[in-house]
Image: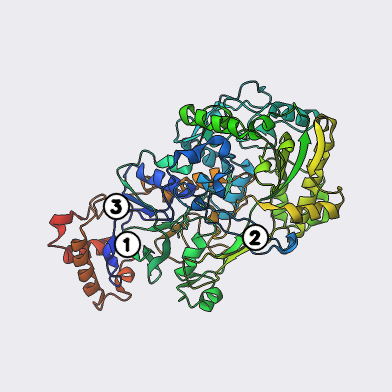
Amino acid sequence: MTLWWSGVGEPSFVFDVGPFPPGNILTTPVQTGGPAGCALAYGLVHSPKKPKVLLLEAGGKNADPNFRVDGQRWLTFTNPDLNWGYKTTPQARCGDRVLDYSRGIGLGGSSAINFGVFTVGARDDYEEWARIVGDDAFRWESVQARLKRLENFHSTPPAGVSSKYVAPKASDHGSSGPLHVGFPAECETDLVPLLDAFEQAGYPLNPDHNSGNPIGMSLLISSSHKGQRSTAQDLLVPCPENLTILTESPVQRVLLQGEKAVGVEANGKRYFASKEVILSAGALDTPRILMHSGIGPKEQLEQHGIPVVRDVPAIGRGLRDHAFCPLVHTRTENSTGRAGFYGEQAVMDAALEEWKKHGTGPWAKFATMMGIGFFKLDGLASSAEFKSLPADEQRYLNSETVPHFEIASHFPIHWFLPGFRNEDLNYSCLLVFLYNSQGRGTVTLQSSDPNVPLLFDPKFLEHPFDRRSAIESLREALRFTRTASYAKDTVSTLAAPKSDSDEDLLEYWAQTIGSSWHMTGTVKMGKPGDVDCAVDNHFRVMGIEGLRVADMSVVPVLPSCHVQAVACKLPSLSKACWPGGQKLTCTLLGGQISPAPYVLKSWCRNMVLRSRAPSCRNGISGFYGRNNLRDRRRLIKRCLPSHSQHTAPRPC
Ligand SMILES: Cc1cc2nc3c(=O)[nH]c(=O)nc-3n(C[C@H](O)[C@H](O)[C@H](O)COP(=O)(O)OP(=O)(O)OC[C@H]3O[C@@H](n4cnc5c(N)ncnc54)[C@H](O)[C@@H]3O)c2cc1C
């Protein structure tokens, strides 16, 4: 995703683009449509100055309402039209398995194919983020305030669930934002008994996992409402006048003039920026666009014949992700209602008709509600692997609100286990999530063709701490399945480790591990001078003027949650990303006027001519220093006397 904005803040000029033949010239912001990009567009188009925004998305419109069936949220990612279809490289510690590494394509991005788990993470994640980048804007209080503006939380819990499992405080949530989140009207029969089982087994309860402290067992908040999944696309409905969305427009590269971004190229068309370019193509594709623009690790670029504009070794390093494995048991016949629904095609078909008419019925109930628990591991801190971590990391992992692993219930695994038998449909599936990965994966170039994906190597289980954490998390989850409160309904084991020895637990992870698709950190944010960082706390690509990245690739911590909420709130985290938040020094393009192309061509001619003047050492962009507004105004007056009546580009 790529974004330009114009007409606000200190202007940059479309007619700075002498070397580029004018293709499509726009003075508008441009971006693509994942959660971060949609949220960014939402923030921009509704900001006080109402700049025009152009959103470029590689995929389609994702407009089919049938993609929104709440109970089928687990299946959309299997639709190849909605998925880039990425895979990892063979994972050395996971039996050389190649793992699914899905990313959504089309409006809504991965939020259009994700599982609807809506979790915001731990207060201490954001405190750590603020520490790493040296900016209080990333501290929890500020983040929570911004999230509340985005969220429309429907707090009524499903019928029959006790307030000990769900009692969110209104002050922790937003109620008027565009993103609908909450609970389904009813939940499956075995959900409350499962929560009871956790309580009886001595696990802490948490009445709201989105309060800033996720620790404990909770009822899941989902990105859905009234039987319908929400996606980030909803932020842009109705489409505001000042937003233009172009789908089927994959961006191949950023257009640069020297070390300044002036636009992007998408399928042979060039779009020139009047202000800035912002990439939000996600953690796997933003690095691809940067590298094919000549911004990335020098050796890789040279190996593929891409001229190096800026050597940034950090780009493509630092990939982090969560991973999970399942524990599956068949359960007593009356303890779940799943066989009666999933086992009967006619029942499912009738339910779909009901959903289409009213948005209600079994498709608004089955697999829409989970128990979700975030827990600490008592013994982890005393392990040798923990003790060999850097002191800051140990402190972070020991902080009050950071969980060491997660258990989520009610995952409909029968859709994914080949040969799953109908008679086993009364089952329980618990997913065990591995958190706080210390491994650092890579995304690397494999071709000089910008349409070829990068190679993705998350390096699952390669770090000793990750293996220790995987072993202890799974051991703890197994312990739970053996407690009387859970085991009383277990009939047989469908998927579990052979024993709870370290070797068997690790082997089970290796054989069953899956990515949680929470990729972060491939264009990491940090302080200027940090060698592992590529963008600063204002999302600016360090060393490149007019280029920002605002998506999960910049996040410098691996948040303790399923991360779509983080992606959505990202763009609001820096005032610099909100035109309304910037001090307006001058609006040279007369507000958000798009000059007619013929006027721009004349401007370009004039500016190129001007750039040859002896006083202009580095061409136009060199001539315009950031603080050289008076010179810019003078130059424009000299260059544009005869065009000002067409375009009203009056200096203020
Ligand atoms: C199967 C699956 C299940 C998930 N489940 C959950 C969940 O339950 N809860 C949760 O919180 N998170 C979940 N996630 C993760 C979450 O959806 C992502 O972390 C989040 O969407 C990332 O947002 P983003 O804006 O950074 O990137 P993305 O959502 O990946 O969006 C990037 C956008 O950029 C577009 N794009 C890419 N390259 C280009 C290009 N060259 N030109 C133009 N456009 C381009 C893409 O098509 C896409 O629209 C899941 C993800 C997947 C894949």
Viewer-nearest residue: 626 or 538: 538
As drawn, the residue found furthest toward the front would be 346
Question: Which mark is nearer the camera, 2 or 3?
Answer: 2
Q: Which mark is residue 458?
A: 2
Some atom of ligand 1 lies within 8 Å of the CB belonging to the residue at label 2 = no
* First in sequence: mark 2 vs mark 3: 3
* First in sequence: mark 1 vs mark 3: 3
Q: Is residue 538 left or right of residue 524?
A: left
Residue type pointed to by label 1: Phe
Q: Is residue 161 left or right of residue 267?
A: right
Question: Which mark is nearer the camera, 1 or 3?
Answer: 1
Q: Residues within 10 Å of mark 2 (few under 14, many from 20)?
A: many
Q: Residue 487: horizontal and vertical position, in percent? A: 83, 33
Some atom of ligand 1 lies within 8 Å of the CB belonging to the residue at label 1 = no
Q: Is residue 409 left or right of residue 302?
A: right
C-alpha separation, residue under disc 2 versus residue under disc 3: 41 Å
Quadrant (top left/top right/bottom left/bottom right) for the N terminus: bottom left
Q: Which mark is residue 459?
A: none
Vertical comparison of 257 with 164: above or below = below
The image quadrant of residue 480 is: top right
Q: Do the residues under discs 1 and 3 have CB atoms within 8 angstroms?
A: no
Q: Does residue 547 appear in this view? A: yes
Some atom of ligand 1 lies within 8 Å of the CB belonging to the residue at label 3 = no
Q: Which residue is mark 3?
A: 7
The residue positioned 61% from the left and 44% from the top of the image is: 562
Question: Which mark is nearer the camera, 2 or 1?
Answer: 2
Q: Residue 610: horizontal and vertical position, in percent? A: 22, 73
Residue type pointed to by label 2: Pro
C-alpha separation, residue under disc 1 versus residue under disc 3: 14 Å
Vertical comparison of 433 with 319: above or below = above
Q: Which residue is mark 1?
A: 272
Residue type pointed to by label 3: Gly
